[in-house]
Image (spheres, coloured by chain):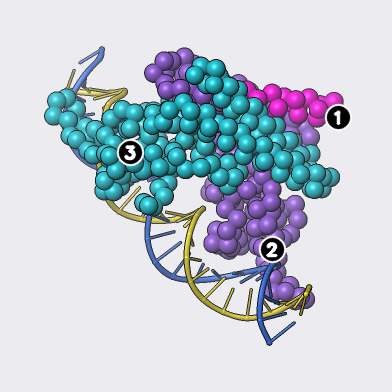
Chain colours: A purple, B cyan, C blue, D yellow
Amino acid sequence: MPAARPPLDYALLGLVNKQPAAGYALRLIFQTTPLGMYSDSPGSIYPALHRLHRLGLVAAARERAGRRRRTYRITPKGRRLLRQWLDAPLTYEEVASGNGGPELRLAFLSDCVGPARVREFLGAYAGVLDRLHADLTRARAAMGAQLSTSATIAMELGITLTRARAECCRGAARQIRTAT
Amino acid sequence: MPAARPPLDYALLGLVNKQPAAGYALRLIFQTTPLGMYSDSPGSIYPALHRLHRLGLVAAARERAGRRRRTYRITPKGRRLLRQWLDAPLTYEEVASGNGGPELRLAFLSDCVGPARVREFLGAYAGVLDRLHADLTRARAAMGAQLSTSATIAMELGITLTRARAECCRGAARQIRTAT
DNA sequence: AAAGGCATGTAAGGTGTTACATGATTGT
DNA sequence: ACAATCATGTAACACCTTACATGCCTTT
């Protein structure tokens, strides 16, 4: 199996999979959507596209007409890697780490798999979130009174949002179920 | 003003500010609390402590009795930097970037400032979240139908959680207000 | 013709990750 | 004595950030 790539690579791969695009257009997407958590600066996007190209995950094409521009599209190899990343089971660590990994995968899921898999993913996500919620609740009980006021608030915030996230996932999964 | 430090440095600074601790104990904290979003591996914690020491933000002390261990405590200079980081106004970018910056600051806030400032921070956070919520809602409307099913779900998830976060903040702020 | 946005690129520096390595202390 | 845990450290590598740099195209 190929080596794991950084999140930015998967974000780019997912975007060019949906539709071929140039670096600048991808930067704009990062600036104007909730994907804003990723870089958006030329110093990270262009090197990332170069290494995706070097790895054979995307193909580059110069455009003749108009502006000097390099359009990238995904290759079969890139599509395989993307698919593999999307198919990987959700781990507790991935969810607990709190980087947007699961959401990123969710964003691209429908471009590669059917609604059944999306529903399964949402169910798994909700399940892991339940476990995380239980652990956080336990941790809060253990730390109890030694937390400061604002630390307690931060903790409660984390717990509440974990629960809300799980409920959102279940709600979305139900909608998919009824729509199928 | 001193240069901005990476999030891990502030996390460590906030922890040793509350109570002096050794590297290993700090690692355990990262492993067992919602701070788990930060490293926890020896290869990141120890170098981070070394550079905090080099910068004069923490002081190190070998323990004579028992295990070979190096306990770190915050210095006045470190406390100033921590305070400055906590006092900095919340920016839209900090909130939108979606790394846990605001929550990290919140976690340590009560160790340095009074409840009035905590309340103010929560209010500001809620306000920025409202703006972010409006922008996300607008972005969803703009992208509209060109999103896939799962991408729509991811988008809705982000919007819903942004709102939930704002409500949590307001709820917490109210509790502080009544408790004062 | 000038200005502003489009479009890409690179270099330096710091930082996180992974893997490896060492040794002391405690428990059994 | 042995194992597990405590406790720290380093080296290689890839990555991101920042800053700088270039030039074309479109608009005014």
Q: Work out whether residue A130 can be spotted.
A: yes
Q: Tell me the element at label 3.
A: helix
The reply, left or right, for residue B112 in relation to residue A175 is left
Q: Which residue is mark 3?
A: B79
The first of marks 2 and 1 along the sequence is: 2
Residue occupied by mark 2: A22
Tell me where residue D2 appears, x and y as whole percent: 23, 23
In-front residue for pair B19/A11: B19
Query: Same chain, marks 2 and 3?
Result: no
- The structure residue drawn at horizontal position 42% and vertical position 23%, both measured from the top left corner, is A148
Mark 2 neighbour class, 10 Å CA radius: few under 14, some 14 to 19, many 20 or more:
some
Residue A91 colored magenta? no
Disc 2 residue type?
Ala
The answer to whether B27 appears left or right of B35 in the picture is left
Q: Which residues are magenta?
A: A162-180
Instruction: Tell me the number on the disc at residue A179.
Output: 1
Q: Of the numbered discs in the image, which one, if any, rests on residue B141? A: none
Q: CA distance from mark 2 to mark 3?
A: 46 Å
Evaluate if marks 1 and 3 touch, with contact meaning CB atoms under 8 Å apart.
no
Q: Main secondary structure of the magenta part?
A: helix
Vertical order, A141 against B60 (above or below): above
Q: How many callouts does the rendering have?
A: 3
Q: Based on the displayed image, in which of its 4 quarters is residue B52 positioned? A: top left
Up/down of B97 relative to B175, above or below = below
Left or right: residue A153 compared with residue B20: right
